[in-house]
Amino acid sequence: MKSSKHYLWTFIGLTLLAFLASAASLSYYYQEAKTSLLQQKESAGKREIRELGVLLEQQIHAGIAKETVIANLQKSILNTDVQSEFVCMYNTQGIELCHPDPSLIGQKIDASNSSINIAGQRNSFRQILKEGKERSGTREFPSDSQRSSEIVSVYPVQGTDWMLASHANIAAVQAQLEDLFLKFVVGGILFTLFISLSSFLLIRLIYRSYEKQKEAEIAELNMQVNTLQIMKQQLETVKNNIAQEFSDKKPTRKRILSYIRDEVIALDTDDIAYFELNNNAIIARTFDQNTYSVNGSLDELVNELDQEVFYRANRQFIINIRAISNIWVYGRNQLRIETTAKSETPILISKNKVSEFKRWLDR
């Protein structure tokens, strides 16, 4: 009788612990999955309208009439699902140019329609469209509109007053996530019960045969201790190797030295818009439009600078990502970079490096 009570309390204790652990882990992963999914929706929307915007710009540059471009876009998005996520297009005056629901085309968004929360700052959606800049944030509607919040990204089509916009309904995303979470909860409960019952049966079996298996278990424990010691030594070796790799890692340069007559000037790399090879001399141009001569070569500099910030555009230029103001399609499959610190020589990305350049931008 006493043993039966011990078994019962053991089973109850294991079950409670397993439920608590499962509940805590499921809650944590749910929040993480929700945050990650919303970020993915935002990134996907920005990428979609950016690529669509480039396509529209190419059509306009090819001489296709704007009315035809708008009509083609409307055909491609007609009757798409507006309950979850969709793409539409406005102009900077807030007038709908393209929408999956044709009845909304031509309507103008007023200032009280909705607001966008961007990094904690609220602006009316109409004002965001009027500014004509690429933006992304959470679009919120008045309580009486009976519309749920959206993740919205807008992208200006160069050479026009058009603003492409991607929408992702947060309530729809939440519903999908909750449905998936419910399935995980059911699976977690079943798995927890299975683990608890299996553990209980295993403990009972071990308890009954404990005396007979004592010596064998001690030998097994000794073997496990030896195995753990070996694993510990291996982990220490791996730890030392990793520490050695980090200690050998070469730090990126934070300053560049330049000389003007007898004066030595230390330039912060954060202040440099780009490096240019000009008549076999390396010139550093800063964001405040000043130029300085630099010793060395572009090959040496690109290996010493922060690869996340600086990119070797071609044989003549290394550019700072913060200096890029515009990227234009140039020629056949080339890109032309416009920087805030203007360059007399065009900065071109060859067609062979376009994919690599886009991956660098999208880090």
Image (cartoon, grey):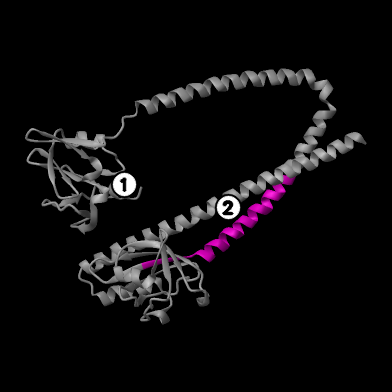
Cα distance between the residues tagged 1 and 2: 31 Å
Q: Which structural element holds mark 1?
A: helix
Q: Position of residue 197 (x, y in %)?
A: 77, 41
Of 323 and 348, nearer the camera is 323
Does the magenta run of residues contain 338?
A: no
The answer to which of marks 1 and 2 sits earlier in the sequence is 2
Classed neighbour count for the residue bearing mark 1: other residues with Cα under 10 Å, few (<14), some (14–19), many (≥20): some
Q: Is residue 9 left or right of residue 147?
A: right
Residue at left offset 74%, top offset 46%: 193
Q: Is residue 321 above or below residue 10?
A: below
Q: Residues in magenta?
A: 165-194
In this rendering, which labeled residue sits more in front, label 1 or label 2? 2
Of 286 and 331, nearer the camera is 286
Q: Amino acid at mark 1?
A: Trp
Q: What is the number of the mark on residue 30?
A: 2
Q: Which structural element holds mark 2?
A: helix
Q: What is the number of the mark on residue 220?
A: none
Q: Position of residue 268 (x, y in %)?
A: 23, 40
Q: Position of residue 235 (x, y in %)?
A: 52, 24
Does the magenta run of residues contain 183?
A: yes
Q: Is residue 332 left or right of residue 73?
A: left
Q: Which residue is mark 1?
A: 360
Q: Position of residue 95 (x, y in %)?
A: 34, 78
Of 58 and 357, nearer the camera is 357
Q: Is residue 238 above or below residue 294?
A: above
Q: Amino acid at mark 2?
A: Tyr
Q: Is residue 165 left or right of residue 15?
A: left
Classed neighbour count for the residue bearing mark 2: other residues with Cα under 10 Å, few (<14), some (14–19), many (≥20): some
Mark 1 in CB contact with mark 2 (< 8 angstroms): no
Magenta span dominant secondary structure: helix
Residue at left offset 31%, top offset 32%: 251
Q: Residue furthest front?
A: 263
